[in-house]
Amino acid sequence: MPTSGGVIGTWPKTLLDGSTLRLPRFSVYDVRGRNLERNPTKPEYVIDETFVHHMKDERIQLDRALELLKEEAERKAPVLVPDIKEEK
């Protein structure tokens, strides 16, 4: 599922009475320097896993991810190299 895009970091602030409050303080940036706040991650595949699935102990996101990995592994099957025996 897409993320919320809420990535502002908070910092604790101690008030005069000794209680603390967390205030927005800094942003998180990606490797290109783009601020990630309000820029949610957009997944390639959206699998709507609800609490009903959890109640039935179904993990449909994980199952779909494993299917996709298996398909990709089959498409990109490794090239087998013959064993090279050392001559004595």
Image (cartoon, rainbow, N blue to C red):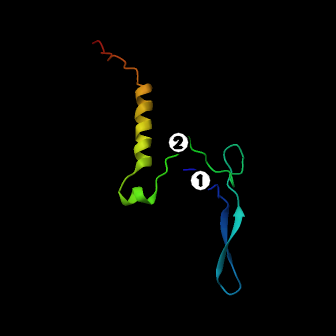
- Above or below: residue 79 compared with residue 16: above
Q: Position of residue 7 (x, y in %)?
A: 65, 58
Lower sequence index among marks 2 and 1: 1
Determine whether, in the image, residue 77 is placed left or right of residue 30: left
Q: For marks 2 and 1, give the one nearer the viewer.
A: 2
Q: Position of residue 86 (x, y in %)?
A: 31, 15
* Crowding at mark 1 (Cα within 10 Å: few <14, some 14-19, many 20+): few
- Above or below: residue 1 compared with residue 24: above
Q: Position of residue 12 (x, y in %)?
A: 66, 72
Spot the residue most to the left: 88
Under tag 2, what secondary structure?
loop
Q: Position of residue 62 (x, y in %)?
A: 42, 47
Q: Any mark on residue 45, and which?
A: 2
What's under tag 2, amino acid-wise? Tyr
What's under tag 1, amino acid-wise? Thr
Residue at position x 64%, y 51% in the image: 40
Q: Any mark on residue 3, and which?
A: 1
The one nearer the camera, 65 or 25, is 65
Quadrant (top left/top right/bottom left/bottom right) for the C terminus: top left
Determine whether, in the image, residue 73 is placed left or right of residue 46: left
